Image (cartoon, rainbow, N blue to C red):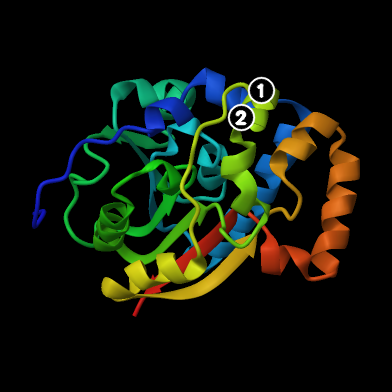
Amino acid sequence: MPSQEYYLETPDIETSSDDYATRFAGKVGDWFLKVQRDATLKMLKPYAGATVVDIGGGHGQATEAIIKAGYDLTVFGSDAVCKERIAQFVDSGQCKFDTGDLLNLPYPDNAFDVVLSYRLLPHIDQWPRLIEEMSRVARKAVILDYPEKRSVNVIAPKLFKFKKQMEGNTRPFTLFSREEVTEEFNKHNYQFVDAYAEFFLPMVLHRKLKQPAISSAAEAVCRALGLTSLFGSPVIVKYTRR
């Protein structure tokens, strides 16, 4: 039970929408999601056949890959509308879908082997509470992503108007450092074990270039030079129970 009152937050309604999905449309979008998918499956590899809950995962970005890899998947959304983009998997019995309060998850402690959450933390105002709840319901590990302060994102507030003009459906978001996120997980007996920075160059640049082969080559150079590990974003991180 929560030790204090928390107000309802539902940012996953937006990330579960068809409009949001256009940010990952086309060949560049496929490449974005492949980078994310490959990193996710690598971090999940030690937990073959595990129970996984994807908090705020109605966007469906990881759904099919996790199912095909043999995991027992539940997607959790703040509203029934968050099911729409993954309905084919839910209705066919390939995964489960639950709804409720993102900050007061309706599950007992240690309910799932692994908790997964993408595109959610930077849009939650009460983010320490989200980390607390993910840590509570996870038995073994939590995997999530966040936009890194130590990246080109540091100038994001100054460029938001320009980015909005270019992308149309972008939203304000909170930047984090790994230290901030790790500090919260440490409070709940979780330790940092792995991280994968996805891109060094801004994703908006790749979207406008519309040349995934060129983007991939450029990012490969940045990664080889060590730039991505130092200044890349978003970052996928993994924490395990101590």
For residue 154, side relative to residue 176 (left or right): right
In this rendered view, identify the residue nearer to me: 98 or 161. Answer: 161
Q: Residue furthest bottom?
A: 242
Instruction: Give the residue number, with chain letter if any, for mark 1.
Output: 165
Whether residue 37 is visible: no
Q: Residues within 10 Å of mark 1 (few under 14, many from 20)?
A: few
Residue shown at 19% from the left, 60% from the top? 109
> Which structural element holds mark 1?
helix
Q: Residues within 10 Å of mark 2 (few under 14, many from 20)?
A: few
Residue 134 location in percent, x, y? Answer: 31, 56
Marking on residue 161: 2
Residue shown at 61% from the left, 44% from the top? 156
Residue 140 location in percent, x, y? Answer: 36, 68
Residue shown at 71% from the left, 53% from the top? 199
For residue 195, side relative to residue 128 (left or right): right
Residue 23 falls in which quadrant of the image?
A: top right
Residue 21's place in the image compared with 98, above or below, is above
Q: Are marks 1 and 2 in contact (CB under 8 Å)?
A: yes
> Which amino acid type is marked by label 1?
Gln
**Viewport quadrant of the C terminus:** bottom left
Residue 197's place in the image compared with 226, above or below, is above
Residue shown at 78% from the left, 38% from the top? 206
> Which amino acid type is marked by label 2?
Lys
In this rendered view, identify the residue nearer to me: 149 or 220. Answer: 149
Whether residue 94 is visible: yes
